[in-house]
């Protein structure tokens, strides 16, 4: 399976899809994952490239296109939460996700990558990251903050997770009719759904379905760096249901780096990746074009 590049790398820097696709093709990528910050006009332009066979869309990241009324450069995949206890808000998340599934179908993509909501608490992840960056991972302050954050999340998560399952039930049925697969992505923030154990619960709840696991290398490594879950445990537990992988490196807790700019040993992924696994480089704008050319060559040789 060829490597894709997520348009999250350059979508915030360009004004239109012509620029976006030109920059990506200049790096010798012929497949892309469409990110969550593309508007309807850009999607219409991208469709022309697909029709001309100038580019292949491997996957789509929810929400794509940006939901109506949301500024493109302020769009987030968590703008609507499918775990919301407010039914109107949850239904907006489901409706916008169905549009992303339609986008994937129209562009012959295989999958849609999902964020599955959150537990509505004040998140402490960034505070933990700041302490980690200050060399305080082994301090009582760090340990207390992490323990409190995890305890609060665990005590309040149940109704939010139930809403996520409700949303996924509807989305699974919709995706099945359109022959689109859904990837449940490893998360970055403690309050986000799913946690390590919630991934198992989702997969058990939807056996033989259109719902799969989507591994994110930087997020899984962050969980390990913060002492919450081990990176390889995600792969050991869920690789049998793994649809795709976001490939990016991490420096300390600064993720979405180019593949060769960080601390990850990508060789450790090899036992868990299959030929059919969708492989997407998800570096952000800090990565230079040369960084991505070198990272692409490295990963192609490795895989």
Image (cartoon, grey):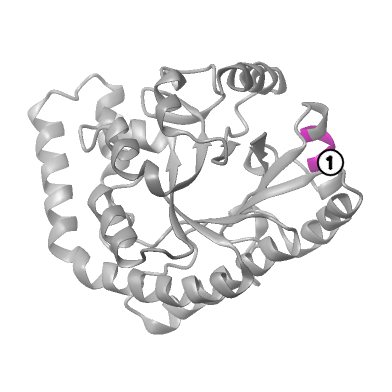
Magenta-drawn stretch contains 140? no
Q: How many labels does the image show?
A: 1
Percent position of residue 281, x then y = 59, 33
Q: Mark 1 points at which residue?
A: 19
Q: Is residue 136 visible?
A: yes
Percent position of residue 272, x then y = 41, 33
Q: How many neighbours does mark 1 have within 10 angstroms: few (below 14), some (14-19), or many (20 or more)?
A: some
Residue at horizontal 11 percent and vertical 34 percent from the top: 143
Q: Nearer the viewer, residue 127 or 88?
A: 88
Q: Nearer the viewer, residue 11 or 270?
A: 270
Residue at horizontal 66 percent and vertical 37 percent from the top: 4
Give the magenta range. Answer: 20-24
Q: Is mark 1 on a helix, strand or loop?
A: helix
Q: Tell me: residue 266, above or below residue 15.
A: above
Residue at horizontal 28 percent and vertical 69 percent from the top: 160
Q: Main secondary structure of the magenta part?
A: helix
- Which quadrant, please, contains the N terminus? top right
Percent position of residue 170, x then y = 46, 77
Percent position of residue 12, x then y = 68, 44
Residue at horizontal 21 percent and vertical 64 percent from the top: 157
Q: Is residue 16 visible?
A: no
Residue ranking furthest to the right: 52
- Which quadrant, please, contains the C terminus? top right
Q: Picture quarter containing residue 109?
A: bottom right
């Amino acid at each position: 399976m060829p490597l894709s590049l997520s348009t999250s790398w350059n979508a915030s820097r360009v004004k239109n899809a012509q620029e976006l696709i030109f920059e990506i093709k200049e790096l010798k990528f012929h497949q892309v994952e469409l990110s969550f910050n593309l508007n309807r006009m850009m999607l219409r332009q991208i469709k022309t490239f697909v029709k001309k066979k100038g580019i292949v869309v491997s996957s789509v990241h929810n929400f794509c296109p940006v939901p109506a009324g949301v500024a493109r450069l302020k769009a987030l995949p968590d703008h609507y939460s499918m775990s919301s206890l407010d039914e109107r808000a949850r239904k907006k998340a489901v409706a916008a996700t169905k549009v992303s599934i339609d986008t994937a179908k129209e562009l012959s993509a295989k999958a849609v990558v999902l964020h599955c909501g959150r537990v509505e608490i004040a998140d402490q992840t960034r505070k933990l990251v700041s302490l980690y960056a200050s060399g305080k991972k082994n301090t009582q302050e760090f340990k207390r903050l992490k323990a409190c954050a995890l305890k609060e999340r665990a005590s309040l998560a149940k109704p939010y997770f139930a809403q996520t399952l409700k949303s996924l039930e509807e989305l699974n049925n919709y995706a099945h009719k359109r022959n689109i697969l859904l990837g449940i992505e490893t998360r970055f923030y403690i309050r986000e759904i799913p946690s390590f154990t919630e991934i198992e619960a989702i997969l058990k709840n939807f056996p033989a379905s259109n719902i799969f696991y989507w591994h994110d290398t930087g997020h899984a490594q962050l969980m390990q760096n913060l002492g919450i879950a081990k990176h390889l445990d995600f792969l050991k537990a869920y690789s049998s249901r793994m649809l795709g992988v976001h490939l990016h490196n991490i420096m300390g807790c600064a993720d979405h780096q180019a593949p060769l700019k960080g601390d990850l040993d990508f060789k450790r992924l090899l036992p868990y990746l299959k030929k059919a696994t969708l492989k997407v480089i998800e570096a952000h704008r800090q990565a230079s074009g040369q960084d991505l050319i070198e990272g692409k060559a490295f990963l192609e040789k490795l895989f």
